[in-house]
Amino acid sequence: ALSSWKYRLAHRPAMSAPEVLHEPKRRRFVIYLPAGEEAVLEYEMVSRNTIDLYHTEVPASQRGRGLGLVLCDAAIAHARGASLAILPSCSYIRDYYLQKRPEHAELVAS
């Protein structure tokens, strides 16, 4: 147990995880970034129990930091907590996120 603790301590990210806000009125999850930039995941409720995750965007200056994954994790946690199926019409979510996090494939609407 001690060695895994040391590993986590030595390999923790230099920056703490960014805060993701859910803005239901705007139908999006957002991370507010410096200089007024935003990373967003936008969605639409397509039925009472299905959420379409249709667009994810991270500013070019902030790419490669894992912000897209953090946004997707927040949206998936919301879907799971609300017992929603997901429709991954965003190519990032469908072609990258769900490949990286296959444990969430069970949420995809059939």
Image (cartoon, helix red, strand yellow):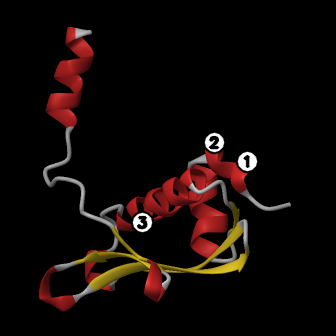
The residue positioned 26% from the left and 82% from the top of the image is: 61
User: Tags 2 and 1 in contact by the CB under 8 Å rule?
Assistant: yes
Residue for badge 2: 103
Looking at numbered disc 2 in the image, what kind of residue is underneath it?
Answer: Glu
Extreme residue in the right direction: 110
Residue for badge 1: 106
The residue positioned 20% from the left and 78% from the top of the image is: 33
Residue 20: x percent and y percent?
Answer: 32, 66
User: Tags 2 and 3 in contact by the CB under 8 Å rule?
Assistant: no
Mark 3 residue element: helix
Residue for badge 3: 71
- Between residues 95 and 76, which one lies in front from this camera angle? 76
Position of 77 relative to 1 (above/below): below
Residue 110: x percent and y percent?
Answer: 86, 60
Residue 21: x percent and y percent?
Answer: 32, 70
Residue 100 seen: yes
